[in-house]
Every structure is written in C-alpha cells, then in structure tokens.
Amino acid sequence: MTDQINIPAVVKNLDVVIKNQNGSLPYPTNLYSVYHAFSQFGGIGNTVVLSFLLLFAVSKKRQNLGLLSLVPSLFNQNQLLYFGLPIFLRPLMLVPMLVTSVVGTLIGYTAIMMHLIKPATLVTPSGMPNLLLAFLGSNDGWSLLVVAIIFGLSVIIYMPFIKIQNSETIYEK
C-alpha cells in the first residue's frame, strides 16, 4: 500500500521532472526516494540479505530455507522466511532488522543530499525488486553503487547475529 502522506511529494517531484529535466526537485528526500529505495531490500529489515546469509548456514534445514526464500525475497515476499525462521518478537533478529533499515535510510539520504545520486522520482511497479527501485526510479547508474554498499553493510550487520543463531542450532542438536 502506498503511504498517503508521500503521494503529494512524489507527484510534485514527478511534475518537475516531466516539465523540466534540469529543474531542482521541491522534495528530493521523501519516503519513496529514501526509505523505499534504500531501506527495504526484500522487505522490512533487508530480509533478502538474511535469505542470502542462510545459504551458508550450518544446518541443512536453514540452507534449504535460505534457498527457498531467496527468490521470493527479491520480490518483497517474505512469508516463507517469516514463518520458517523466528524473526519477530525475538531481540536477536530484531536488532539487525532495525539497524540495517536505519543504516540504509541514512546512506541513501546522505547520498541524495550530497548530490551523489539522483532521488527516485519515477514511480515503479509494485512488487518490483527493491534492489532495482533506486536505479529505475531515478535512471541513475550511481544509485546501483549505493545499493551495493548498503547490501554489503547489511551483510556485515547480519553476520554476527546469524552466527549466534547458528550456534544455538548446533547446541540444540
């Protein structure tokens, strides 16, 4: 669902882009251009990173979960991951979900405000992989580099928590 507060800012930005390619945007940083484009890779908490890291888990069950949830996570469908791995109401996994979202938002905001990348002004189809939203929404190749940096930092943030969870799995056996 689209956030109703976000729509006027996106419409005004799109209007400026359509009328004048070189005009400055009235709202370069809004929920769409920052939060949706840089903070929700695979859904809330950058869970596509979690699916990717599960591919290297110790447990065969977790590896299978990572394999099964990777492609749907690319398209922001995380139900397999949410039901297969205890994520919600568990502080161990809640911490990296919050931290990766904040880090992604801050990096995207900083890159837009420093004019390193263009903000996402073009509305993309719903269900499209959020890894491509910044690129397709702004038509700026440098946004792919920012997305890759955020993805790499998200992997680094999630790794210690996945290691703890893997050690708990080994301990259960």
Image (tube, rainbow, N blue to C red):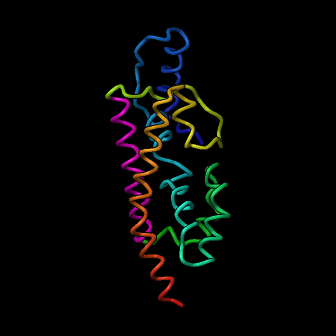
Residue 141 in the figure: left or right of residue 71: left
Q: Is residue 51 magenta?
A: no
| Place of residue 126 in the rendered image (x, y in percent of width and height, measured from the top left) | 65, 39
Q: Is residue 7 above or below residue 94?
A: above
Q: Quadrant of the C terminus?
A: bottom right
Q: Quadrant of the N terminus?
A: top right
- Identified at 41% across, 24% down, the residue is 27
State the residue lying farthest toward the top.
20
Q: Is residue 94 magenta?
A: yes
Residue 29 in the figure: left or right of residue 121: left
- Identified at 46% across, 82% down, the residue is 168
Residue 109 in the figure: left or right of residue 8: left
* Most common secondary structure along the magenta stretch: helix
| Place of residue 25 in the rendered image (x, y in percent of width and height, measured from the top left) | 42, 19
Q: Is residue 23 above or below residue 146?
A: above
- Identified at 36% across, 33% down, the residue is 111
| Place of residue 82 in the rendered image (x, y in percent of width and height, measured from the top left) | 58, 65
State the residue lying farthest toward the bottom.
173
Provide the residue span drawn in magenta.
Answer: 91-113
Q: Is residue 64 above or below residue 150?
A: below
| Place of residue 150 in the rendered image (x, y in percent of width and height, measured from the top left) | 42, 46
Q: Is residue 21 above or below residue 112?
A: above
